[in-house]
Image (tube, helix red, strand yellow):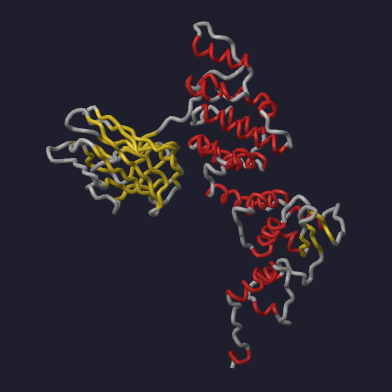
Amino acid sequence: MAAEIFPTKKPASANTVQQYQQQNLNNNNTIQCCNWQGLYSTIRERNAVMFNNELMADVHFVVGQSGGTQRLPGHKYVLAVGSSVFHAMFYGELAEDKDEIRIPDVEPPAFLAMLKYIYCDEIDLSADTVLATLYAAKKYIVPHLARACVNFLETSLSAKNACILLSQSCLFEEPDLTQRCWEVIDAQAELALKSEGFCDIDAQTLESILRRETLNAKEIVVFEAALSWAEAECQRREMNTTIDNKRKVLGQAVYLIRIPTMGLDDFANGAAQSGVLTLNETNDIFLWYTAAKKPELQFACQPRKGLTPQKCHRFQSCAYRSNQWRYRGRCDSIQFAVDKRVFIAGFGLYGSSCGSAEYTAKIELKRQGVVLGTNLSKYFSDGSSNTFPVWFEYPVQIEPDTFYTASVVLDGNELSYFGQEGMTEVQCGKVTFQFQCSSDSTNGTGVQGGQIPELIFYA
């Protein structure tokens, strides 16, 4: 009887909820059901129906700059519960009774993303809108959404966007994000300086990067990046991109480039012929390279310290035998994972056990079959059991808690040293490495023994 009198309500299906939310997003939210409240079992779901909904709306926001505005409905009570700024705006001592509020400094998609969080308790972020959403969350003091934005930015951080995110993190006063940006910029400096985003940074961020002591880059790359930024800055200021104007927009920042620390060839064929330096500056720098009595320069003259590479050694001993370790074009491979973001700069490899020899090494780093870095180079082995470094062209960013595959194909002396007593876990400073066997390994290398004894990294 009870079941007949009080029939069990079926909860709204996922498709129904998504349909309502999509209608709301399109601002096409006429509710057809007179008892729509009965479709939802929780206050959270019923609140979600009100998201971007004209039903019972008691305030409207005109969001965006002139020519691209969007009029969005709101409900003062829901907004005030979600934000102290909205509470003060609608219920505070200085509250204004306006039916329409203009917000020209927030982009409509970002404002909608913030409203979706307030109404639906859902975080919907994308690479295109996350910075604007962070701005909105900061402006209206929605701290959990702001934290989610920062987390999104940290996980998507790379050399391509690190410079522009550094600029934004300082603007938003997010020191943790700032530190993560510096870690990427320091370790992958040349990639960061050559990225398109570098040319979009503001002058203050440019100076902070040029001043950076731990920048891991050749100075000629720093110089060329500064010229690219200057060209973009001329365009932003609607100035002709002449040599004189480039020097003008660089201003005193040009002296932060450590031109005297370049190799003489880099200076003679690059900076000296760029036209950015005055004739006196060029002459003085040439004298700095060659004269016993060096002139005083306005440019910083001490090389950058850069970063000190660290090594993760995974074997407790090494050995050699009369019939091992042979190569013949086969692949030595191992998989590894870390618990903190690091940057793999190269591998340490064993060399010949039969006197000095030269090897050709093709090294490769993959994640889930996708090649992240590769390089073909040579190294000389002196016949000792030492390891010999082989480097990638640029350090490769490694994210925590996922396995990567390190591989090498060697060509050289048939017999070499090999590692023994391998460890599945190695602690290197604050970073923990875990190792497991790789199916790519066709030459016998595994966790317990073989090649690739060292991973060279920055952290």
In the depicted structure, whether residue 260 falls above or below residue 171: above
Residue reaching furthest to the top: 293
Question: Residue 398, how many percent across, how many down?
Answer: 44, 45
The image shows residue 272 at horizontal and vertical percentages of: 56, 21
Q: Position of residue 360 (x, y in %)?
A: 28, 36
Residue 344 shows up from this direction: yes
Nearest the camera: 166 or 78? 166
Count of numbered labels shown in the rendering: 0
> Above or below — where is 132 with respect to 178?
below
Name the residue: 69% across, 58% down.
109
Q: Which of 173 and 392 lies nearest the eye of the viewer?
A: 392
| Residue 342 position in % (x across, y down) | 44, 41
Horizontally, is 309 left or right of 175 in the view? Answer: left
**Image quarter (top left, top right, bottom left or bottom right) of the N terminus:** bottom right
The image quadrant where one finds the C terminus is: top left
Residue at the farthest left position: 322
Rendered image quadrant of residue 211:
top right
Confirm whether residue 91 shows in the render: no
Residue found at the very far right of the displayed protein: 97
Up/down of 230 relative to 8, above or below? above
Left or right, 445 with respect to 119, comes to left
- Quarter holding residue 413: top left
From the viewer's side, name the closer residue of 251 and 241: 241
